[in-house]
Structures are given as C-alpha cells and as structure tokens.
Amino acid sequence: MKDKFILDACCGGRWFWFNKNHPNTLYIDNRKCEKGHDNYRKNHSVEPDMIEDFRNMPFDNQSFKLVVFDPPHMKTLGENSKFKRYYGKLNKDTWKEDLFKGFNECIRVLENYGVLIFKWNECEIKKKEVLELFNREPLFGHPTNSKNNTHWFCFMKIPSQKQLNP
C-alpha cells in the first residue's frame, strides 16, 4: 500500500475520475455491483479495491495525502431506485451522524497538510446543513452551474487550525 497515497472513500462508479484506475489511488466503497447490475446503464459497476465503511476505516492515522469524499446525497430513495443503485443511499434516521463520522474519518486518515476534496449535491439536503456537521470551514469551493446543484469543497488538515464551534 506504500504507493497508495490517495483515498477515494466512497468510490461508487468512479464517474468523476479521468483515470478510473489511477495507480496511486485506493478506491473503497461499502458495496460491490458488477457490470450488468442495472438494465439502464449496463456498463455501470461499483468495483472497489476494498469493501469498507467510510465511518470506520481500517487505515492508520495520517495514511493519505489526498482524500476524496463523495458520500451518497439522498435519504428518501426506494430500495429499488436506480439512483440508489448508482450512488448509494443515506440512512434517513442516522445520516447526520454518518456524515459526521465519515468526514472525521477522512480527516483522521489524512496527513497533516493533506487535502480533502468533498463533493455534495443539494438534491435533498442543503450544503449549509451538511457543512455545519463538519465543524471545519472549507478553504474554498465551487458550485457547478447545473440543475442538480452539485458543489465541490476543498479542506486542508492544518494541525494548528482550530475547529469551528469546538
């Protein structure tokens, strides 16, 4: 694992990766879905290097230089929803705690001065509500100008930085 210094903590179908098999990236997800699992997107698959839960990752502290955190964004999907098959689903009762734990795990496994890229879509939960869970302020972010309200945020693990609202 020495050559794996980038972590994708919820890789899903690796849709935003230019190189979907980047040699320095460890791709994890809590599920595996082989090609053909969906009739609408026959080539879609979820094939993590390891099946892990982003809320409790088995990695040492400060294991990665870059972490990408793109958790599921929706909590009201039906069990047979195509969006659930593509992106996963948040638990409607524990989503706040789950995202809080996941973000903190991403920070824990990130090296000092490492970068965390967080992606969020406001389809059901506003970004303000999610960012308030993290107790840290992003360095900067970028909303896409699309109907689906996807936002990207950049955080850095700065050891001397005080968290918001301790």
Image (cartoon, rainbow, N blue to C red):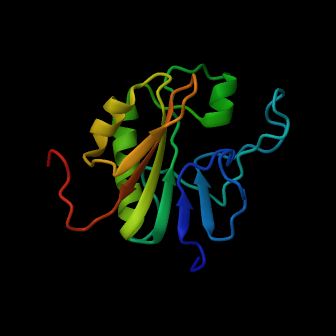
Quadrant location of residue 131? top left
**Residue 85, above or below 135:** above
The location of residue 106, given as percent across then percent down, is 41, 56
Question: Closer to the camera, 33 or 133?
Answer: 133
**Residue 24, above or below 91:** below
- Residue at the far left in the pictured view: 166
The location of residue 70, given as percent across then percent down, is 52, 44
- Residue at the far front in the pictured view: 145
Quadrant location of residue 19? bottom right
Identity of the residue drawn at 47% across and 51% down:
54
The location of residue 25, given as percent across then percent down, is 61, 65
Q: In the shown orientation, is residue 49 left or right of residue 144?
A: right
Q: In the shown orientation, is residue 152 left or right of residue 61?
A: right
Question: Closer to the camera, 56 or 8?
Answer: 8
Considering the image in quadrants, where does the N terminus appear? bottom right
The image shows a total of numbered marks equal to: 0
Identity of the residue drawn at 46% across and 59% down:
57
The location of residue 82, given as percent across then percent down, is 70, 25
Identity of the residue drawn at 78% across and 40% down:
44
Identity of the residue drawn at 65% across and 27% down:
83
Q: In the shown orientation, is residue 143 left or right of residue 28?
A: left
